[in-house]
Image (cartoon, rainbow, N blue to C red):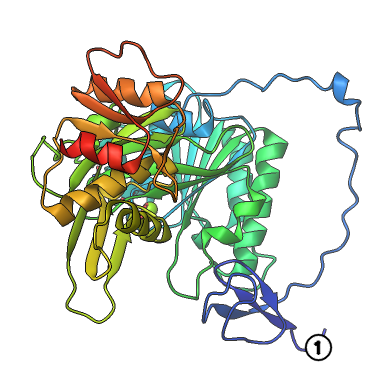
Amino acid sequence: MSAKKTGYYCSICGHFASRWMGRCAGCGEWNTYVEEVVSPGREPRKTEPRELPLPISEVSPADGERRSTGMTELDRVLGGGLVPGSLVLLGGDPGIGKSTLLLQVAGAVSAGGHRVLYVSGEESARQIRLRADRLGTAGPQLFVYAETDLGLVEEQVGAVGPSLVVVDSIQTMFSPDITSAPGSVSQVRECTARLMRLAKDRAVSIFVVGHVTKEGMIAGPRVMEHMVDVVLYFEGERNQTFRILRGVKNRFGSTNEIGIFEMSGAGLREVPNPSSFFLMEHARRDVPGTVVVPVMEGTRPLLVEIQSLVCPTSLGVPRRMTAGVDHNRVALIMAVLEKRLGLMLGNCDAYVNVVGGVRIDEPAADLGIAMVLASSFRERAIDGRTAVMGELGLTGEIRPVTAVDKRVREAARLGFRRCIIPRQKGIPADAGGIKILEADTLAEAFGLVFG
Ligand code: TYD
Ligand code: MG
C-alpha cells in the first residue's frame, strides 16, 4: 500500500473529519481534533452462526443471576448487581478513586470465591499489591496482571478463567493490529469493541476504567459510551472526601440511582445514610442564606443544604453564579421573587450553592431556592429545623412535587420539626411528629417560613 491514509478524530466525542478543523462538528468543543491513521477495513471474517433468530416468546426471560459486587451502593447503581457478560465503563477524573473502587470490588468478589483478574496498564503488580494490602483486599482468588497488550490480556482471561475482569485503564491498552498510539480514538474504540466481544463470548463481567481527559491527545470515555452496556461516572471534589457514583447509561436497569461513598485512609467507604452525611455541617445554624431541601436521587430521598448570598452589586451587570443548580432556573426564580414578592433583586449579585457538590435537577427544589434567596436578601434566617419543597410557577403558585411522603418522612427521620410543602395529594397523615405546613403561593410560603 502507498502512504498511510490519515484522518482527524475528535478526542472528546470521536467525531471523524477528513481535514483538521478548529471546532468539532460533533460536540462543539474547540481544539480537539487529533490526526490518526485510518485503519484499513479488515478482511471480512467468516462468521459461524452462534445463535439463530427466535420468536420472542421463546426467549428465556431469566436475567441471568446477578452477582453482588460486595458494595450495596454500587449494586444499586448497577440495577441490583453485576450482570454476567456485561461491559461496564467507569469514567471519572484522574485521582478520583476509580482504581480504588474497582480494587475493592475485585477484593470483595474474589473473597466470595470467584476468580478475578485485575489488569493494570497504569501500575505495576507490586504497586497494586501494596494498595490491596492497605485496602485489605488481597486474597488468593485475585489475580493481578500488569499488561497493556490487549491480545495478551485476552489470552490470560482464557487461561485464568475469571468471572470478573477489571481493565485499568482503557487509555493505556492497545491492540497490536492498529498502528495509532494507545489512548487514541481508534485504539480506544478497537479495544472497547474487543472487550465487548470478550465479555459476551465468555460471559465474563468486565469493568473498564476511562479517565476523563481535559486536553486533546487522549480519547475520553465519551468515545466509548455508546459501545458499552453500562456507563458509570465517579464524581466528587478532590479536596473533599465524599464521592458520588452516577449511572448515565444502563442496559440492565435504571439510571436514576446514585451511590455515595466516602474516601478514607482505608479506601472507599459506603455512606448508607447520605442525608445525615450531607447535613453534617448544617448543624442547625440559624443564619441567613441557608435552607434544607429534600430532593429525590432515584428512589431515595436526600436532604441537602442550599446556600445563597445576595448583596448589592458593584458592577454594571450584576453577577449570578450557581453551583449544583441550573443557572437559568435561578434566574427565573429571582424574576418571580421580584415580581410576586417585590424583592428588588435586580441590582444584586446572587450566588447559589448546593453544599457538598450535589447536583439538583428537579423543580421540587424551586421553593427552597426562592426561600434561601429571600433569606439572604432580607437578612433573615430560616429556622434550621425546617425543610422546604415545591415547584414554583411563573405566577407565583406552588405546584405539587413527586414522592412527597418519602421526602417528608426523610425530614422527620432526621429530626426536622417542620416541612413547608405544596397543597397536594399524598401528604402523609402522620410522619413521625413533623409539622406539615401547606402553601399555595409563594407569598403564603414566605409567610410560613419567615413567620
Ligand atoms: P485512585 O483510585 O488511584 O484514583 P484513579 O484511579 O481514579 O485515578 O485514587 C487516588 C486517590 O485516592 C489518591 O489521591 C489517594 C486517595 N486514596 C485514599 O485517600 N485512600 C486510600 O485508601 C486509597 C487507596 C487512595
Ligand atoms: Mg487509577
* SS at badge 1: loop
Q: Is residue 243 visible?
A: yes
Question: Can you give x and y, in whole percent of width and height, for residue 45 in the image?
Answer: 87, 55
* Residue displayed at 52% across by 82% down: 31
Relative image position of residue 331 (x, y in whole percent)? 37, 61
Give how far across and how far down residue 337 sits, in percent: 31, 54
Examine the rendering and report whether any part of residue 173 can be seen: no
Left or right, 82 with respect to 346, comes to: right
Whether residue 210 sits left or right of residue 346 in the image: it is right
Answer few, some or many: residues within 10 Å of disc 1's Cα (few below 14, many 20 plus, some between 14 and 19).
Answer: few
Between 127 and 66, the residue placed more toward the observer is 66
Q: Residue at x 57, y 23 (%)?
A: 66
Give the labeled residue for mark 1. Answer: 2
Task: Name the quadrant containing residue 64.
Answer: top right
Residue 315 falls in image quadrant: bottom left
Give left or right: position of 429 versus 91: left
- Residue closest to the eye, 393 or 138: 393
Asked if the residue at label 1 sits under 8 Å from ligand 2, the reply is no
Q: Nearer the viewer, residue 233 or 443?
A: 443
Residue at the left extreme, as displayed: 286
Q: Which quadrant holds the N terminus?
A: bottom right
